[in-house]
Amino acid sequence: MGADFSYNATIPDNPHTDENETVSFVKEPNVIEVKAYRDTWGRGLDSYLSWFYETVVILYESLADNGSIYIHLDYNIGHYAKAIIDEVFGRENFKNEISWKRTSAHANVTARYGNVHDVIFYYTKSENFTWNQQYVPYSQEYIDTFFDQADENGRRYARRDLTAGMDRASKGQKYTWRGITPTGSRCWVYTKDKMDALDADGKIHWPKKVGGMPRLKLYPEDLPGIPVQDLWSDFSQLHNLAAERVGYPTQKPEALLERILKVSSNENDLILDCFGGSGTTAVAAEKLNRRWITCDLGRFAINTSRKRLLSIPDVKPFIVQNLGKYERQAWQAAEFGGEKKAAAMVSQYRRFILDLYRARPIEGYNWLHGIKGGRMVHVGSVDSPISPNDVTQIAIEFKKAMGTGEDAPSITAVDVLGWDFAFELNEVATQQAAQAGIAVKFVRIPREILEKKAVEQGDIKFFELAALSVDIHKKSKEVILTLKDFIIPPDDVPAEVQKAITHWSQWIDYWAVDWDNKDDTFHNMWQTYRTRQDKTLKLKGSHAYEESGEYTVMVKVIDILGNDTTKALKVTVP
Ligand SMILES: C[S@@+](CC[C@H](N)C(=O)[O-])C[C@H]1O[C@@H](n2cnc3c(N)ncnc32)[C@H](O)[C@@H]1O
């Protein structure tokens, strides 16, 4: 991904043609991402450092008292950043500046040295922290130098003194063994029995000289290896063909995160990576049985992480949350709040949205707020998703509004505008509305509205929710789902992409099913996606239930732009 949040998305091939031409396009950053970029880099280093300071303070406050933090930075910025981290964490809590050699030598550098490393600052919050010593294997050079003896099988070993100072040994270690007694204040390291056992095992090195001091044979495999130092060159940036690669340009090797997590955390500890990118930290944490939280500002990052986590066998259920709510509440208060009462603020907010939607505000209703071309309009609140219950209320009020006065709807239709929609909504709500004889259109309020510039430029477009059509088929206790159609709103999709897509399934990146949803988190019980070996997407999925009963099946489709669309279906298993 570009530093400005643009990224390359790929359009999969049409499964019904022989053409194998993978088309990709650059997904431009959205307004929120442009704003984030401006906040951090807008005034160059200055703005970056003040953003960095605020971020480090938040991280310090969130970190457990016995926690550790690793901050990975480009060599360009590292030394400025260190002064800030010192101030927040305290210099005494600075542990290491790790140099990570991320690439091999560059051949094309002129008039300066090739830059092959990044820095990782390691701090703890206090003197009480987790440290699990890790080791790396000895290099051949080290073995050749320090393991200078060879046994009868040619295995290399080093010799270690078998005597110790009397002060460090327990009583009973001063004795004569094989005719030799340690001199002065020295004694044997082990008891007599242990020495006999080592000798019987061939673990004692006897010098050629008669009466020479025996020593312990130490083989490389008897030792843990070299304790990890602050120069890490044993794993480098992923090359283009690495199996781990998920198509995220700044993806880090899992081994790098694995080392950090093993050293500074234990099983069940909680790990946070707030600049998660492709999710490497979460993946490493999941595999090492740590609990994790990861976040990222980019939709592509979240999509990539989710897909990657789902491909870990037996991944534990996790939730993806959109924190836009807080941002929207802050925006609403700043734009329409001030000294006003809450009701006045909300009413002004609704007028603003209606205006952009080109609807006329109406008064006197709780659930109906405007009218456009004869259709009623509902404006969803900033802090909760539109739910089936909202739709019920809208339908009840709609009946009352019919045929009463100048604001009466001339068509039995409602446009429900919302920031978010409860995931069971499509199916249930549309059914409810249809029963009441009302045609409901669900329309997403575009995030661009939060940006003054975009509003002033007048290029705000509203789009209907993506629509997913699924067929359900039963064969005794087996339920078979088939995707039949998927329509995505043309929201920020470049025209050339729309042209390149000739079959609806090309919009789908992958899809997943929760076969037994209990109105809670989506549990990913099954998923399917294209792989390097098999480039076609399966459109059928099935599940054999063990018990009869009523189940809610939740189908989640993730499109190539990283949006998800969910549909709930009820099945009765005989
Ligand atoms: C260098 S990448 C992390 C790569 C990651 N370690 C991996 O293995 O894929 C940094 C990430 O931080 C995200 N980011 C940048 N500014 C952010 C912000 N203010 N809040 C949250 N995420 C942000 C970017 O979207 C980007 O994905």
Image: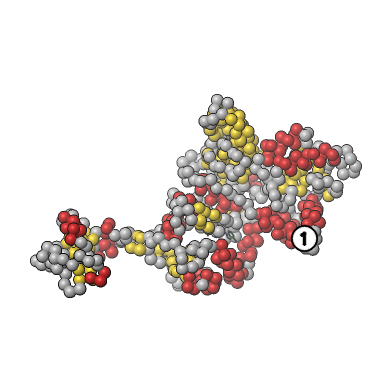
As displayed, is residue 522 above or below residue 259?
Answer: above
Q: Is residue 81 left or right of residue 445?
A: left
Kindly indicate the quadrant of the structure image that contains residue 427: top right
- Identified at 65% across, 48% down, the residue is 493
Name the spot of residue 485 as percent of width and height, x first.
Answer: 63, 36
Q: Amino acid at mark 1?
A: Gly
The quarter of the rendered structure image containing the C terminus is top right
- Identified at 20% across, 61% down, the residue is 191
Number of labelled discs?
1
Asked if one can make out residue 252 in the rendered structure from this viewpoint, the answer is yes
- Identified at 70% across, 52% down, the residue is 383
Residue placed under numbered mark 1 in the picture: 337
Mark 1 crowd level (few <14, some 14–19, many ≥20, 10 Å Cα): some
Name the spot of residue 536 as percent of width and height, x first.
Answer: 52, 38
Name the spot of residue 9 as percent of width and height, x first.
Answer: 57, 49
Q: Is residue 347 left or right of residue 388?
A: right
Which one is in front, 50 or 521?
A: 521
Which one is in front, 217 or 513?
A: 217
Which one is in front, 228 or 18?
A: 228
Mark 1 Cβ inside 8 Å of ligand 1 = no
Kindly indicate the quadrant of the structure image that contains residue 515: top right
As displayed, is residue 110 above or below residue 361?
Answer: below
As displayed, is residue 30 above or below residue 517?
Answer: below
Name the spot of residue 181 as percent of width and height, x first.
Answer: 14, 68
Q: Is residue 406 left or right of residue 150?
A: right
Q: Secondary structure at mark 1?
A: helix
